[in-house]
Amino acid sequence: MSNNALMRPLFAAILVALLQTAFLGYMIESRASILRNGVDVVLKTVPVDPRDLLRGDYVILSYDISTIPADKVTGGFPTEATDAQLSVRLKTQPDGSWGVTEASFGALAPKDGSVIARSSPFYFYPTPDSPQASLNVDYGIERYYVPEGEGKVLEEARNASALSVTARVDDNGRMQIRLIAIDGKPLYEEPLY
Amino acid sequence: MYRGRIEKDFNTWVSKGMLDAGAAKAMLAEYDARGTVFSAGRVLLVLAAILLSAAILLLVAANWEAIPRLLRVAGIVGLIWAFYLAAAACLGRGFKAMGAALLVLATMTFGGAIALVGQMYHLSGDATDALLVWFAAACVAAVAFRSAALAVFCGFLAWAIFGELVVDNDVSFEGNGYIYLVPLLIVIVIALVRYTNAGIARHLAYLLALAWLGWFYIELPEVWVAGLLFGAGLVAFLVASLPLSPLYRFARDAGAAPAFYSFALAVMGVAALHTEVDGLGQEIAIGATTLAVALGGIAIAGRLNGAVRFLGYAVFAAETLYLAFETLGSILGTSGFFLIAGVVVALIAWLVIRLEKRLSSKTTVEGSVA
């Protein structure tokens, strides 16, 4: 009996701690696998409005691929309000950075020389009377945590459009930040773990 | 608390010779021996656990760059294991309070770990997702350890999720579907409360249900929503408090809460209806309905249920003052209104005193029969 009284909580402790550890491991590994297997894309950042968005210890990043002109969307728009995700085809531009060539609410076929990114889920509602000229989407790489006090440098560079981010995209279109550079000089390089 | 009051009453009864001193002593001893008795030490221990976990969370927020990432992850995972294993050791040896405090500490640390990992690896997930994972983990832990402390913790996390959804503005009807998860969270918390015997934590769930329904009306301020809240509250109240109802015994087992919260829902609905009415006829109808609900609530459940009784009084007083202000206030001006208000409050006081007397004499008669 006393043995049982000790075993039950012990079993519970191991089960619960194991589950929690597994979840934390999953969080870390799902990011690492994107960095390990993904393809590099260099992204230009754009100024964020309002300009002072240093929240706590992270810098909010916005990219030129975050804005998708409506005329680049192939396959039409949903006719009813819905939860949506965009597939976005990225291609190298003459200046070396990657830009949007095509986007779709459905899937896009892979093509040589291009990479397909998936946006984060967002809510889309059609406005037939005044169609939107562009869509704003996130890719899950909009946040970069920095040591206290270092955020200002990144913010200023971002707002001067001197900041570039190299991200990796995996086969499922998920992205993670690999490198942050100012005027082409690497500032933060992200290890796998 | 109850312990102090009952001891005082026992002393009175013993000194009047109504109760044997030995019996009173035995009853108090039985009460003290109960497992769930409130103790200041236990509460302080849990508070200490919360303070410690706050320290851990702040350490995370400070974004400690001095240690390599993997070491930081290992450290916080190590803390989680250490706290859960220590909790298991305490519970196994019968140190219940210490065990509960360690469980809370461990589960708080897991929340900190999610934030730490998200921050170190620049994961732009949203706060609701993180809170939902945290909630799920806390529920699993509450079931695995059958821990009342963790059931309470789950109740607070459910509130945090609701708050985050409301603040986040993601919750317009068309926004993400998370807000519709709230009833599910409520059901889970109530199930946990029943399973772990967490007692008062059920109020967290009931209050969340009221808050969610209130949010519903704020998002969709239509007559039918207000009417639905009122109707549903009224039906639930009658089901919970009429002895005829098949669920009466079941609801009585759960204490005063079912009748009180369903009554509160009906009151919320009728309050919402006040903003929808238009014109004198409707004003009078809604005013009369409100007064009838307040008095009906007191008449049906007020004798056994102090919470319903006082809510009934409050609603009756507020509605009477509101009606006096709406009808007479504009004619008489401010000073006249206070005069009327004074008279009305005096009348209500008289009514309350009469009612309380009636109710208590009824109880004595029934008590003497039983």
Image (tube, rainbow, N blue to C red):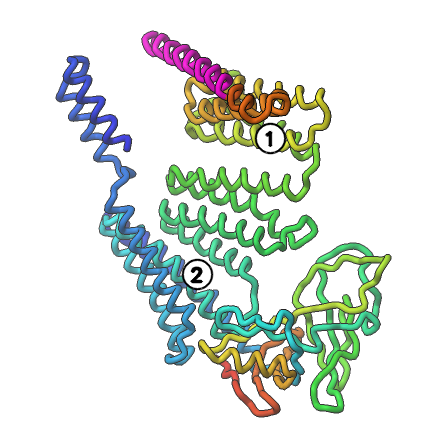
Q: Quadrant of the C terminus of chain B?
A: top left
Nearest to viewer (mark 2 / mark 1) = 1
Q: Quadrant of the N terminus of chain B?
A: top left
- State the SS at label 1: helix
Is residue B239 at least partly visible in the picture? Answer: no
Q: CB under 8 Å between callouts 2 and 1?
A: no
Mark 2 is on which residue type? Answer: Gly
Q: Image quarter for residue B320?
A: top right
Residue positioned most to the right = A129
- State the SS at label 2: helix
Residues behind callouts 2 and 1 on a single chain: yes
In the drawing, does residue A73 fall left or right of residue B323? right
Q: Nearer the viewer, residue B351 or B326?
A: B326
**Circle 1 residue:** B271
Q: Main secondary structure of the magenta part?
A: helix
Q: Identify the residue at horizontal 61%, vertical 47% (top origin).
A: B180
Residue A67 covered by magenta stretch: no
Horizontal and vertical percent position of residue B353: 41, 14
Q: Chain of mark 1?
A: B
Q: Nearer the viewer, residue A162 or B84?
A: A162
N-terminal of the pair, mark 2 or mark 1, is 2
Does B208 sit above or below residue B243? below
In the drawing, does residue A181 fall left or right of residue B251? right
Residue B350 covered by magenta stretch: yes
Residue numbers of the magenta segment: B342-370
Does B298 sit above or below residue A141? above
> Which dot marks residue B111?
2
